[in-house]
Image (tube, rainbow, N blue to C red):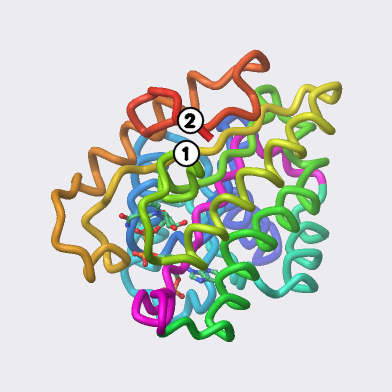
Amino acid sequence: MKILLLGLALVCVSIDASAKTVLITGSNRGLGFELASQYAADGWTVIATARTPDDDAELQALATQYASVRIAALDVTDHSQIDDLADELRGTAIEVLINNAGILGDPGAQRLANLDFSAAEPLFATNTFGPLKIADAFLEHVEASKTKKIMNISSVVGSISLANGNIYFYRASKTALNMLMRNFAKDTAERGIIVGMIHPGVIDTDMSAPFDIPKVSVEESATGIRTVVDWYTSETSGTFMQYTGEPIAW
Ligand SMILES: NC(=O)c1ccc[n+]([C@@H]2O[C@H](COP(=O)([O-])OP(=O)(O)OC[C@H]3O[C@@H](n4cnc5c(N)ncnc54)[C@H](OP(=O)(O)O)[C@@H]3O)[C@@H](O)[C@H]2O)c1
């Protein structure tokens, strides 16, 4: 009887097969947390990944509020951890994969006359290669879904034509992300995969704290991003857009 009850309990907390699944990286704070909250409130199954989820009280509270939120530990620079999670989730169809986790690094170390090239490595590992590794590792999961979307939180500062100086390595990491994902879109188009690169706006999160410029709320950005994710089609796959849906020049 105990075993039967335990079995029932497991069924109750397991992923609802009829709900759509989104996997979000860096979902413990900032934009990732807001996206996880909004998708959960909208009835999605959310695989909310974070580097050190045991320390993330807000994310734990979200998972308590919504049984459809499943937390998984994932450092996007740890390729074997990415492979392990992909194996663990084999058989789970992921409608939308959102490569959100990112770092800015120290802006002071990315300024002319003060360039610290050792600062570039973690930026590329996190913002550029992590997303590609994750997209590649979870390709089967996304392909098994109906909508098949891989969305990348990029940045307008990665636009070459709009470049206006400073934060050299962060900019380059997002430009390179766009290049990798543009190619990923081409290589996976025949499999029906839809790839997006989305600028979330200058959002009022920890990352933008060093900059005293107008910011959008994280709620507005996440709401816009979710709409843009819906708008992406096979025709627009591989393009670069604002969270408002306007195209951004490369
Ligand atoms: N804020 C802006 O104005 C702005 C503008 C353009 C683009 N973006 C992009 O938007 C995305 C979200 O940024 P945000 O504003 O929400 O920044 P944030 O508040 O600083 O949050 C960054 C998130 O990324 C996670 N992260 C960092 N390195 C990671 C790693 N190696 N593995 C797993 N997770 C990692 C952080 O986790 P920890 O808590 O463990 O550090 C945190 O959850 C980023 O890709 C960023 O580049 C932001």
Tag 2's secondary structure? loop
Task: Please state, as top left, top right, bottom left or bottom right, where the N terminus lies in the image.
Answer: bottom right
Q: Is residue 68 visible?
A: no
Q: Position of residue 214 (x, y in %)?
A: 14, 49
Q: Is residue 84 visible?
A: yes
Whether residues under marks 2 and 1 lie with C-beta atoms below 8 angstroms apart, the answer is yes
Q: Position of residue 116 (x, y in %)?
A: 50, 85
The amino acid type, in three-letter code, at marker 2 is Ala
Q: Is residue 57 above or below residue 175?
A: below
Q: Is residue 146 above or below residue 20?
A: above
The span shown in magenta is: 91-113
Q: Residue 249 got which mark?
A: 2
Task: Give the residue displayed 73% in from the left and 32% down from the top.
Answer: 185
Q: Is residue 59 above or below residue 21?
A: below
> Which quadrant of the view contains residue 128?
bottom right
- Give left or right: position of 175 versus 68: right
Q: Position of residue 240 (x, y in %)?
A: 52, 32
Task: Give the residue at the far front of this rendering.
Answer: 113
Front in this rendered view, residue 107 or 115: 115
The amino acid type, in three-letter code, at marker 1 is Ser
Magenta residue check for 208? no
- Give left or right: position of 212 versus 28: left
Task: Give the residue displayed 25% in from the left and 48% down from the top.
Answer: 218
Q: Decide which of tag 2 and tag 1 comes sooner along the chain.
A: 1
* Disc 1 residue crowd, few under 14, some 14–19, many 20+, Cα 10 Å: few
Tag 1's secondary structure? loop
Task: Give the residue at the far top of this rendering.
Answer: 235
Q: Residue 161 got which mark?
A: 1
- Give the quadrant of ligand 1: bottom left
Task: Give the residue displayed 78% in from the left and 60% down from the top.
Answer: 88
* Disc 2 residue crowd, few under 14, some 14–19, many 20+, Cα 10 Å: few
Mark 2 and mark 1: Cα distance apart in space: 7 Å
